Image: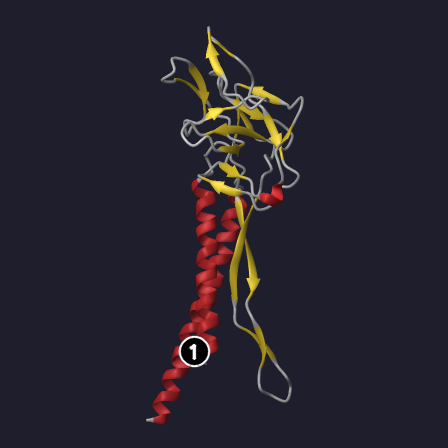
Amino acid sequence: MNASFYSGARGMITEQDKLNVISNNIANVNTVGFKAKSSIFMDLMYYNMHSQERVTTGTGVRMQHTNTDYSSNGVTEERGDGFNFAIVDQDGFFMLRDQVTNEVTYTRAGNFSVSLHNDGYFYLLSDAQKYVLDANGNPIRYINGELTGQPGVVTFANTNGMLSVGSTEFRPVAKNGNPILVNGANVLQNYLELSNTDMAQEMSDTVVASRAYTYALKMVQTSDEIEQTINGLRS
């Protein structure tokens, strides 16, 4: 009976985790450059019940990790202020450098702006006020009404497991390898890549996860009722 309580409770927790991921995708449906995530589950430990039939039973599931969909779906929108950029029809990321820590992160969100730095120069900055880097890894300045370069684009041998930094930035891990410069990247100025959240899919996933949560809750409630009945017979 304890196993049924545990499996049901784990199922509720797992489906709530999935709903949290879905909620975040929906909340960022209008966030420039946002990449939707999906939940990946794993089975917990299985064991053989003490019976002649050697019945195998499990102890539920849990969310192992989330996968990020880096595809752009080809969705771009014209935003003509001169400081917006979009990577079109190919993989890759813009490079950003933190003004304080010098940490480099990567993004598909090209909603940039120009701002005056305390060194007296104007720089092209991301929405999070990080330097936008050119193909040589140097911050792009704004001098005499013109940018000193175009945002560089890099890619990785694989993007599996990249860490999310905020809603639209990513930090590579060891297995991703070093960034690889994309020569001749197709970058459009005055355009932005939109969120790749698929609202129809997210709503469908919400229904599935909500029903699964309800079934897991019912399992816990039923186990509780059986436990109460058994305890009543003992008294």
Which percent across, then down, holds residue 174? 59, 44
Residue at image coords 47%, 59% = 15
Where, quadrant-wise, is the N terminus in this rendering?
A: bottom left
Residue at image coords 38%, 86% = 229
Which percent across, then down, holds residue 22? 47, 49
Where, quadrant-wise, is the C terminus in this rendering?
A: bottom left
Where residue 58 sits, quadrant-wise, is bottom right
Tag 1 residue:
223
Compared to residue 218, the image places residue 100 above or below, namely: above
Q: Nearer the viewer, residue 150 or 133?
A: 133
Q: Amino acid at mark 1?
A: Ser
Where residue 17 sits, quadrant-wise, is bottom left
Q: Nearer the viewer, residue 194 or 118?
A: 118
Compared to residue 4, the image places residue 229 above or below, namely: below
Label 1 residue SS: helix
Query: Which residue is the extreme one toward the left?
Result: 235
Compared to residue 229, the image places residue 141 above or below, namely: above
- Please state if 232 lies on the left or on the right of 144 as rendered: left
Which percent across, then down, holds residue 112? 46, 23
- Please state if 114 lies on the left or on the right of 95 as rendered: left
